[in-house]
Amino acid sequence: MSVALEEARAAAARGEVPVGAALVDPAGQVVAQDGNRTRELNDPSAHAEMLVIRAACRQSGSERLTGHSLYVTLEPCAMCAAVVAAARIARVYYAASDPKSGGVEHGARVFIHPQSHHQPEVYHGMAEVEAAALLTDFFRQRR
Amino acid sequence: MSVALEEARAAAARGEVPVGAALVDPAGQVVAQDGNRTRELNDPSAHAEMLVIRAACRQSGSERLTGHSLYVTLEPCAMCAAVVAAARIARVYYAASDPKSGGVEHGARVFIHPQSHHQPEVYHGMAEVEAAALLTDFFRQRR
């Protein structure tokens, strides 16, 4: 999660919503890390989670990341939760909850429906205060 | 929808699940068209809808596609529904329903939750028989 927090801080420094993610392979190696880049890339799908999943799939030459773990500083939205399921990621660790846009424990709750072809293990709350403070500070400065 | 169906047929010819999409700007021009490329690109997010949304955003230099219409041959999954909402697409037209993986009228029902920051108008059923037949034929040949 410390790598994901670093990426969230780097995103804030680029003027992007400060969310960061890291993808860890079954051997425990970080295989991809990135932060939000929706503004930089003019891409509404360029959330941190999506970017690390695409990067790891490209590197491994596979659509699936079986046995991998995703660390992200904020609860994934419905889009990111669904791509986690599509990639068959084994475990998701997220720091802060996101009542406004989350799609795991809020709203669409993507993983609980039979249409989700895979249900990862989900853990949350680690580094929650730090991850949430990054977001609060970012939006306070913008107002 | 005929452009989307063409793209679905082209996807089948490439060995991809035959789903196609077209994005139409407020003036009625097709600004992006594509079919599934998850296998070709080793990208679990490379659904037809995601590819046309990313292409149109790249071309327009914006994360948002206000006033645009998306035509797609199959009910979008939760991932694609969420990126439609993120891009503020005005209208979604889909041909066949997808009880197995859909995220609009099935499962996550992404647009009905307050966490979806935008609710497009949704229309479905046009060219349903043709779009569904493409999928049925594709999976029958694979078995």
Image (cartoon, coloured by chain):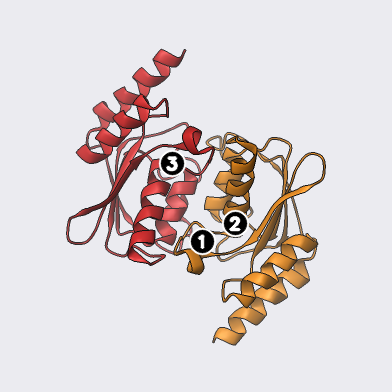
Chain colours: A red, B orange
| Residue positioned 82% across, 45% down in the render | B28
Residue wearing tag 2:
B106
Please tell me the numbered disc located at residue A115: 1
- A59 versus A108 height, above or below: below
Q: Nearer the viewer, residue B37 or B69?
A: B37
Which numbered mark, 1 or 3, is in the foreground of this view?
3
- The answer to whether the residue labelled 1 contacts the one labelled 2, judged by CB atoms less than 8 Å apart, is yes
Type of amino acid at the residue the image marks with label 2: His
Quarter assignment of residue B83: top right
Percent across and percent down for residue B82 are: 55, 45
Q: CA distance from mark 1 to mark 3?
A: 22 Å
In the displayed structure image, the side of residue A95 where residue B102 appears, left or right:
right
What secondary structure is marked by label 1?
loop
| Residue B55 position (above or below residue A75) | below
Q: Does residue A109 appear in this view?
A: no
Marks 1/2: CA distance?
A: 8 Å
Chain bearing mark 1: A
